[in-house]
Image: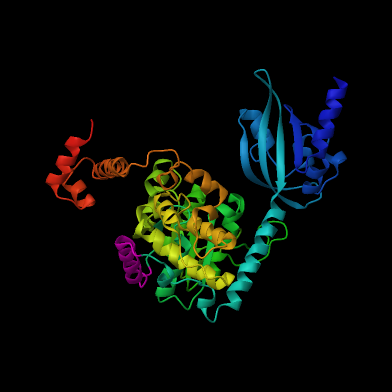
Amino acid sequence: MALTQEVLTAILKSIDEGIHVVNTEGRTIFYNNVAAKHDGMEVEEVLGRHLIDAFPSLTEESSTLLKVIKTGKPIYNQTQVYVNVHGARIDTMNTTLPIFVGEDIIGAVEIAKDYSRMKLLAERLLDLQKGFSKSSSKKSAKQVTYTLHDIQTINPDFIHTKAEARKLAKSDSPILVYGESGTGKELFVQGVHHESHRSEGAFVAQNCAAIPETLLESILFGTAKGSYTGAVDRKGLFELADGGTLFLDELHTMPLELQAKLLRVLEDGIIRRVGSSQNISVNVRIIAAMNVHPKTALEEKMIRHDLYYRLNVFTFSLLPLRERREDILHLTDFFIQQFNRQLCKTIQGVEKSLENFLIGYPWPGNVRELKHTLEYMMNVCEEDKLGLIDLPVILKQHQVGTPSNIGSASLSLRKNLEDMEKKLIISALDRSKGNINQAAKLLEIPRQTLQYKLKKIPQ
């Protein structure tokens, strides 16, 4: 038993996060060096003492450890600000868990991260963003790499979407863009900014999923001096984007409480830095994007209904590549020419067998996957045209057994054409929800012809 306790203590001491354990009376029974460093204390100043004696600014209501002992319920990722016995202000982010033996609670353990240090990291990110913004403030084209012209498509629906975007770009109303990963959401949003009257202003992009939830508010709204240890007055992304466009990608990953603050900015154009009581007016156009369908995001409470309806003034849905297959070969030719210039090659196109595969493959990663696939193939190809042999290994595995590489399967043209026709008819009926007239239009055949072919398909 003694050995087990020694091993456990050694493990807890070696963890690179603050560990603080108290018993049901609120006395500290374990406190590692990392926690002491976070709290600006010595281990001996806390170990064996009641929590409130060591941290007199805490109360039974404000202490996460004492609260968990009282309720028996865990608390995850909650920030806590307190003053230690030396008068220093401490900011931590805590996960606090009850300790049970059977059904009896015997104490609580807190795993703490230095929130002040995390916020300083966020400030460094803001400094980088601010420096970039200053260097490009004279001409925002330096910040915007793409225009709507750069979006390659021959799909009629997508061409219409681009035309609609050019028209609506002139407005200051917010925009919501939905599209699967790899469909080109940021490219599209940059194009909208370029077409707007804000094109000379800043374009600031932030992926909401790339920043820890607890730091995102500071990144967006900035900080006021003294809001936490070492904090200084610092602009957030809203102020950096003043007069321009703020693009918030993966909006559905933003915490709901922060979404409420975003809604207020959309309503009145007023922000308040973290730790400040001063209102700051900003002139920013918000464009948000999600790779989750808005209906799903609402049903699963990933996005607030009121925020969605405020953003949903203009909505664009970017089609996945599998729903605009005419673009596959168009984009293939475009990327081949692009990589010919980059790699100093003279590839003349693709072999017919590869062409069939590219059209039939579902492209779950959309245009991004197609581009990266072609980049790989262009690097390894030693012939005048790209072929099946040049495919990446994963796609070769998918390609085995498909009609473009049938091998031992039936080569009967009649049978394969019948199978393909059946699949297309079923797909059209599924898309039209069983409406014969609509399905016939999708298939571009007369209604009577479709009815005749349906009779030949086994039920």
Q: Is residue 108 left or right of residue 167?
A: right
Residue 269 is at least partly visible in this image: no
Instruction: Give the quadrant of residue 183.
Output: bottom left
Residue 20 is a magenta residue:
no
- At 57% from the left and 56% from the top, the residue drawn is 217
The x, y position of residue 380, in whole percent, is 59, 60
- At 63% from the left and 73% from the top, the residue drawn is 131
Q: Is residue 328 left or right of residue 387?
A: left
- At 43% from the left and 61% from the top, the residue drawn is 266
Q: Is residue 455 left or right of residue 94?
A: left
Viewer-side residue, 149 vs 54? 149
Q: Is residue 112 left or right of residue 182?
A: right
Viewer-side residue, 44 vs 38? 38
The x, y position of residue 154, in whole percent, is 34, 65
Viewer-side residue, 139 vs 318? 318
Q: How is the image coloured?
A: rainbow
The x, y position of residue 66, in whole percent, is 68, 34
Residue 167 is a magenta residue:
yes
Viewer-side residue, 358 vs 246? 358
Quadrant of image for the N terminus: top right
Q: Residue furthest top?
A: 102
Residue range of the region highlighted in magenta in the rendering:
154-172
Instruction: Give the quadrant of residue 175.
Output: bottom left
Q: Residue furthest left?
A: 448
Instruction: Label the magenta part by its dominant secondary structure.
Output: helix
The x, y position of residue 282, in whole percent, is 48, 69
Quadrant of image for the C terminus: top left
